[in-house]
Image: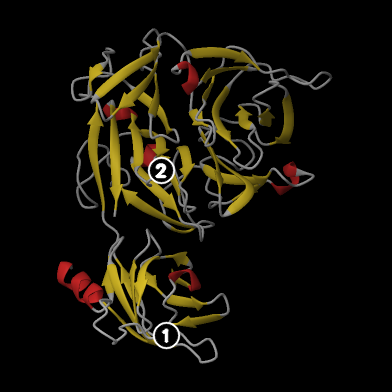
Amino acid sequence: MIAFAGIFYSCNEKNGSEDPYFAYDPSKPTTLLSFYPDSGVYQEKVMLLGENLPTNVEDIKVYFNHRPAAIIGSTGKRMYIQAPRLPGDTCVISVVVAGRDSLIYPDPFYYFASVTVTTIAGNGNGTDYRDGDLSNCQFAPRYICVDKDDNIFVSTRNRDPDGYTNICRIDEKNNELVTIARDVVANIPAANPETGTVTLATETTVGSYYSLDPRELWAPRIREARWPEGVPRPDNGWKHCMVVNPDDGYIYTRYYYGQVVKINPQTFDIDIVATTPQGDSYGMTFNPMYPGILFISMWSNGGEGYANSIFSLDVNDPNPTGTLKRLTAPIASGGHRDGAIDAAQFRNPSQIFCDADGNMYVADCDNHCIRRITPELMVETVLGMPGTAGWKDGGREDALFRYPRGIGIAQDGTVYVADNGNNRVRKLSIN
């Protein structure tokens, strides 16, 4: 690969009056010839050959299945690029010239994704709680999120009804588990992508939730959102997940009884968004490829045909409740099946979160695996052996999970898993 790059850059050196660049003539057509290599992984260096290619990289865009690729340089006859992240197995390479002409190479590029998991925190003992060194810390991580600065927040809950319920932060750089709050019942955390503030739903009262502000070193503060007057209140404060809508900045949550609401983080006022079937949901996310669409995972007690499902609603529609749609197969008992989302099956899908490219990752709890929903709404098993619980790091052939419940995603696309049954936090490296 070093030799490949060296050949490209040596051709850019000017020698006397000889110009190694071939000037782009906008009055003439651009022709695509071939590229090499014909396969590779994320950030694979690929040489595209053609005639009359712009030498100014700002005048060129290259896509692998509509996923933009990074362009390193162009001589007019050769372009040096890098394959983007997760464009799909078989890629059509298209080139847009000067915002006008869209051209396609006749042969496909074959993309290979490599996924491995490693354990980063926890020694497997979830009975007792102990912070400090990551390899020796003891906790029962249930849910997780990652803020804009890649700080990892975990809500813990011991299986013993009288056990501990803490909020903690994983500091990978300093190899330390830091306790933020002890003896607080907090559910799925959500990080605001702009401010970095982390919120966690509680079940104490109808409007209660915790707020962790980075400007205050994440000191926990209890907030009480105001339910609108004249609107029937839920019988209990049972709400498990929160997510921030990047479009309006509001915090969205859902109650066991079905109400989906949004909370103004400045005034703490609640607005009712939609009414959904009763049941527990342990995951909500927005997807940049589908603005305004709220994706929700439903546990096995979901009513009216929504058990073990992923469903959606459009929060921007004048009647969001009318847009309610079960996306996955109508199998109430759950199961495991990959493929198009309308045929896919989950079993107690838990936390769900979307990366910057529109891939939604799901902790498929009772299938003991991690699933991915692509921007094209295809479902695939990323790691884990469906139906087989265990603890093992490694790649597709080896990795095992035990009742994973939490999913968090860092800025670079790294996926973190709260592997609740193994009392560990694990890290997925996707290449």
Residue nearer the viewer, 389 or 110: 110
Residue nearer the viewer, 17 or 7: 17
Q: Secondary structure at mark 2?
A: loop
Q: Of the residues shown, which amino acid type is indicated by label 1?
A: Ala
For this view, does 27 lie left or right of residue 89?
A: right
The relative height of residue 412 versus residue 156 in the rendered view (above or below) is below
Q: Is residue 416 visible?
A: yes
Task: Single out the residue that lies furthest toward the left.
Answer: 3
Real-space Cα distance between discs 1 and 2? 38 Å
Q: Residue at x 48, y 16 (%)?
A: 216
The relative height of residue 390 versus residue 72 in the rendered view (above or below) is above
Q: Disc count in the image?
A: 2
Residue nearer the viewer, 123 or 178: 178
Q: Of the residues shown, which amino acid type is indicated by label 2?
A: Gln
Q: Which residue, given by chain and number where applicable, does mark 2 sit on?
A: 411
Q: Secondary structure at mark 1?
A: loop
**N-terminal of the two: label 1 or label 2?**
1
- Give me the disc on residue 23: 1
